[in-house]
Structure formats: C-alpha cells, structure tokens
Amino acid sequence: MQLGVIGLGRMGANIVRRLTRAGHACVVYDRDPAPGKALEAEGATAVDSLTALIEALAAPRTVWIMLPAGAATETTIELLRPLLKRGDCVIDGGNSYWRDDVRRGKSLAADGIDYMDVGVSGGVWGLTRGFCMMIGGKQETAERLDPIFQTLAPGRGEIAQTPGREGRDPRVEQGYLYAGPCGAGHFVKMVHNGVEYGLMQAYAEGFDILRNANASGVDPDHRFTLDVADIAEVWRRGSVVSSWLLDLTANALAREERLESYSGYVEDSGEGRWTLQAAMDESVPAEVLSAALYARFRSRQEHTFAEKVISAMRKGFGGHLEPQQKG
C-alpha cells in the first residue's frame, strides 16, 4: 500500500523503514529535511511540503501523523484538511488525548475525511520487534488499512495462544487491536501507559530496597550487600516478575550498576495524568497508578536510586533522555 508519513523522529522513521522493507510505498515529510533524505536512501520518497506529500499520494489518500501530542498534531491536521478529499484518511499515531480524537473524528467526518487514532507501543525497538497497536475509528477504514497494520505489528512470534481464545479476532494475537470508534485506540493506549508507570515504579522501588539492604540504619546482623545486577538477571529467568522492562533494567545495571550517569529526573508525557482523570470520571480506585505518577513529580525535586532505575528503563525502551541540568 501507499502511505504518507509526517514526522520522522525515532518512531516515525522506524515505521517508514518497517513498511518500506516490506514493499509498501511511503511518501515522507518532516520540517527537518535530513531524516527524509536518509529514508529516501532506504526506499521512501521524501517531499518538502505538506502539499507535495498530498500530491504524491493516489486517492484515497492515507496520511499517518507521528508528531508530539497537542499543538503540533492539531496544527498539522488543520493544514491538511483543505488539501484532502472525501474518502481520504488521517491517522494520528502519536500519544494524543482521546477526547481530542473524538472531536477531530467528528470534525473531519463533516468533510467526508476519515480519522483514525492509533496508540503505538514499541519505542525505539519497533523496527525489529514490531509495534503493538491499538486502533480507533471506523471499522471499515481499519479493514482497508489492515495491510499497513499487519506489517507494522510484531506478529505472533513464539508466544503461545491463550487458552479459550478460539474464535476471537486473530489479529490481536499478531499484536494489533481494533478497539472501537474514534478515541478508543488512544484511550486503550493511555491506560497502557498508566499501567507502565505502575510497573516501572514497582521495579524501581524493589531495586532501591535491595540496594539499601546494607544501609547504616539497618541492624548490622540484618544487613546484606547484594548485587542488584545479578538479581535483575536471575529474575529474568523463570521468575513471575520477568518482563521486557526487567530485561531493560538488567541491561542497564549490567553496564552501570550504580546508574551514576542518570540523575533520576523522570518526565511524564501526559498519559498518566489522563489515565487518572479517566479513573476519577469512572469512580475507579487507582492507588498504584496515582502513586507512580506522584513519584515522578517528586523525582524532579530529589533523586533516589529508584528514579535512576526508571530513567534507565525509559532510555532503554523509548530512547528518552533526561533533560539537561541547568546551571
């Protein structure tokens, strides 16, 4: 299939690479021409404007936006609107707020333009591992674009089928889900990221306890000097707490056990806050997720080993770098 892609950062560029390597035709645009030129050498077609991108696509056109949530995405959609025709489709693959998706879907539908919100998980590893996707919008549009989603998805791999899933949508086992109408994709991805916050915080606090098992305040007879890198490694193998996040933690600790290159300053990109807002709207208790979000706020004031562990995990799965210290 043919696809236009706007925004060629870490994930956007790898989405293009995964598609072009599978034979799809990608027309790409970014304000910075450098990533487009690099992708052109790998089989994509780079253009220098939104107008040129639309002109290079055959109807019905599909444009995938991979930009930061908020003003950048909103502005780009409004710039595309007069260039698109009835039957064309806009995909927002960033981490937009799901309520914005509901609004955009209704607005674009008035012009006959389809809108899809696709929550994408996979970080900087998506090129090789594939991207897990949660899709919102018109179901018939999702069906039409299935070859794109199927290519980007990780595939079933070596994961055994869950007992009792016979007769259910097999695409879920390939790593992509049609979640429902506009907003549903990003709603599911929002909660996914909220859960991610909680998982990361639990690992981080656990390793902080292990690292401080020989603290001066502990009774000398009860102190242990523990190798946290080895503990992370052994937990990866047969333990009930094994996971990709633990893999990333073990990798970081093996390289630098004290994580001295990390300050422990942990950003939040918005989804954790939105998840808690949804929890309040639904009157659902979310103690773990709220505590994890507040711990990120605290990390910006004082830094513990736990925050360094989270920073290491965020760099591992998403290439997220800590902000430069001022001064």
Image (cartoon, rainbow, N blue to C red):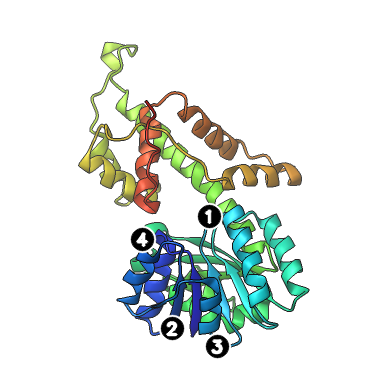
Q: Nearer the viewer, residue 88 or 54?
A: 54
Q: Give the distance between the C-alpha atoms of the residues marked 2 and 4, in whole angstroms.
A: 22 Å
Q: Position of residue 241 (x, y in %)?
A: 40, 46
Q: Sequence-wise, which precedes: disc 2 or disc 4?
A: 2
Are the two marked residues, 3 and 2, in contact with CB atoms closer than 8 angstroms?
no
**Residue 136 image-quadrant placement:** bottom right
**Residue 279 image-quadrant placement:** top right
Numbered marks: total: 4
Is residue 243 something that shows in the picture?
no
Q: Sequence-wise, which precedes: disc 4 or disc 3?
A: 3
The amino acid at mark 2 is: Ala
Q: Give the distance between the C-alpha atoms of the residues marked 2 and 1, in whole angstroms.
A: 24 Å
Q: Which residue carries the number 1 mark? A: 68
Q: Which mark is residue 130?
A: none
Q: Which residue carries the number 3 mark? A: 58
Nearer mark to the viewer, of 1 and 4 = 1
Q: Residues within 10 Å of mark 2 (few under 14, many from 20)?
A: some
For label 1, the SS is: loop
The amino acid at mark 4 is: Trp
Nearer mark to the viewer, of 4 and 3 = 3
The amino acid at mark 3 is: Ala
Is residue 313 something that shows in the picture?
yes
Q: Which residue carries the number 4 mark? A: 125
Q: Is 205 located above or below residue 274 in the figure?
A: above
Q: Residues within 10 Å of mark 4 (few under 14, many from 20)?
A: some
Q: Quadrant of the C terminus?
A: top left
Q: Which mark is residue 25?
A: 2
Q: Residues within 10 Å of mark 3 (few under 14, many from 20)?
A: few
The amino acid at mark 1 is: Pro
Q: Sequence-wise, which precedes: disc 3 or disc 2?
A: 2
